[in-house]
Amino acid sequence: MAAGMDFSPPFAILEGSYNRDNATIMENQTSENLDSLKQTTNGKPPRHLSVTRHGVGSMSLLAAADLASDVGIVISRSPSDEKSDFLPVFRSGSCAEGGPKQYMEDEHLCIDNLVQHLGSTASFPAPGAFYGVFDGHGGTDAALFVRKNILKFIVEDSHFPICVEKAVKSAFVRADYAFADDSSLDISSGTTALTALIFGQTLMVANAGDCRAVLGRRGRAIEMSKDHKPNCTSERLRIERLGGVIYDGYLNGQLSVARALGDWHMKGPKGSACPLSAEPELQERNLTGDDEFLIMGCDGLWDVMSSQCAVTIARKELMLHNDPQRCSRELVREALKRNTCDNVTVIVVCFSVDPPPRIEFPQNRVRRNISAEALNLLKGVLDSNS
């Protein structure tokens, strides 16, 4: 980017086909602009929403479809977690494709009405929902087992629903142990696990591995999980402290993630400290009316797309048709178009019956310039806070 580039031309989002020249202009809009945007609302949800595993659609993308995808700016912290009167309404859609890999090893789970799903067997605040993405490796046994059992281990835990955080952490470890005890399964297979448990206004995301959950908040990407790669500083220190080593980005030269369930050929006796951990990291947030949707995806999506880019594409899709299933298909299609090398699974969860409101930049914006040096400084500050 040339120094002194002019940011001033006022324009409104959101019509027309995807154009990288236009996207370059859009990338230069910093997140501070979004708080003062003028909004209007249109559209209603489709009558029927079905969840599919396969199929991709086509559309004309927003001129800003790659907003910040090259710049890499992500707002990873919420400006506020204040309580509000907002009560979410859950609508979800999903899509999973094998991509270039020979075998499809991903599994996923969508439950929009958790109270109805659990029936009278558990006390749980309404509304409630549960979603999960499980990226298997070395076979499908681990991913399938965790998908079938993780919610049961959560709601049957002695801490549930009084202390949901303890229940979720305990459930991941118990599911890992239960998988090791099942002699009918290949316990050398493994899986990452990403779950989102929503009760009332509270969103709790648990992650073990390199899947990722990203919240769309008025067009901003708020990362609700951290990718557990072996080279990540905190994971590398943990691995080395427990006697593990990292070769060329792989844990003990074998696995490209630092946390996973299964993979019992790489773990010691149950309960022993191990470089490959099944314990999840949790992030919690109180949802407000500004929180529009949640994207959950395996690394096949995030290997080729930034969090902000995914939120921008998803928001444009939902403005066009307000259908989370079609939105998830478009994200998968875009990942395949960008030549992802992995399976791709995406879940999109909407928190309202209405589509995201249209956003326009004010026409009386002050002209300003920013140099490449200043932009890099801004990126560094944001990255250090992520």
Image: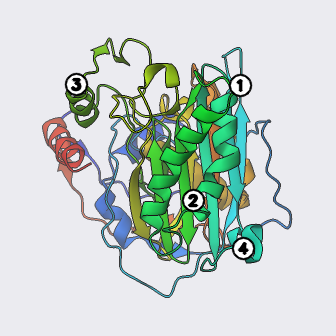
Q: Disc 2 versus disc 4: distance between alpha carbons?
A: 13 Å
Q: Which residue is mark 4?
A: 121
Name the residue type under label 3. Answer: Glu
Give the quarter of the figure containing the N terminus. top left
Residue farthest along the bottom direction in this orientation? 85
Tag 2–tag 3 contact (CB < 8 Å) = no
Mark found first going from the N terminus, 2 or 4: 4
How far apart, in angstroms, are the residues tagged by discs 1 and 2?
A: 27 Å
| Place of residue 171 in the rendered image (x, y in percent of width and height, measured from the top left) | 52, 53
Task: Name the residue carrying label 2.
Answer: 154
Q: Which residue is mark 3?
A: 240
Number of other residues with Cα within 10 Å of mark 4, as a class: few under 14, some 14 to 19, many 20 or more: few
**Residue type beneath disc 1:** Met
Residue tagged by mark 1? 104
Kindly report which numbered mark, 1 or 2, lies closer to the viewer in this rendering. Answer: 2
Q: Quadrant of residue 319?
A: bottom right
Q: Marks 2 and 1: in contact by CB < 8 Å? A: no
Query: SS at mark 2?
Result: helix
Q: Position of residue 45 (x, y in %)?
A: 75, 68
Foreground tag (4 vs 3): 4
Disc 2 packing (10 Å; few <14; some 14–19; many ≥20): many
Q: Nearer the viewer, residue 307 or 376?
A: 307
- Sequence-wise, the earlier of marks 4 and 3 is 4
Q: Position of residue 189 (x, y in %)?
A: 60, 23
4 and 1 marks in contact (CB < 8 Å): no
Q: Decide which of tag 3 and tag 1 comes sooner along the chain.
A: 1
